[in-house]
Image (cartoon, rainbow, N blue to C red):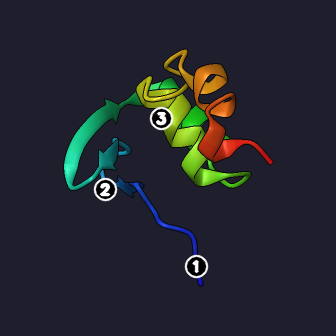
Amino acid sequence: MGQAREFDWVERSNGTVVIIHHGRIAGTLRGARAAEFLAEVDDDPQLVMARWTGNYRHGNERTAKQHPRNRG
């Protein structure tokens, strides 16, 4: 089974990159920032888009890891 994709991105003809999260625009990058994003997005697209939009590490990861349901 494939991994769920929360993020997607579109490169427009004018060089602008639009990052979409759950069907809504999460960020728009232009110029040098768009070029930097395009160079980096090939590694792990979901992680890269999460970092670029700020939807990354909310501080509750440690708490969730210690929850009885998530203990190994």
Secondary structure beneath disc 3?
A: helix
Q: CA distance from mark 3 to mark 2?
A: 12 Å
Viewed as shown, does residue 69 lie left or right of 5?
Answer: right
Q: CA distance from mark 1 to mark 2?
A: 30 Å
Image position of 1 with respect to 36: above or below: below
The residue wearing badge 1 is 2
Considering only order in the chain, which callout, 2 or 3, is on the residue closer to the N terminus?
Answer: 2
> How many residues crowd mark 3 within 10 Å: few (<14), some (14–19), many (20+)?
some
Occupied quadrant, residue 42: bottom right
Name the quarter where the N terminus is drawn: bottom right
> How many residues crowd mark 1 within 10 Å: few (<14), some (14–19), many (20+)?
few
Task: Report whether residue 39 is seen.
Answer: no
Image position of 36 with respect to 60: above or below: below
Secondary structure beneath disc 1?
A: loop
* Of residues 48 and 15, the one drawn nearer to the viewer in this rendering: 48
Occupied quadrant, residue 16: top left
Q: Extreme left residue here?
A: 24
> How many residues crowd mark 2 within 10 Å: few (<14), some (14–19), many (20+)?
few
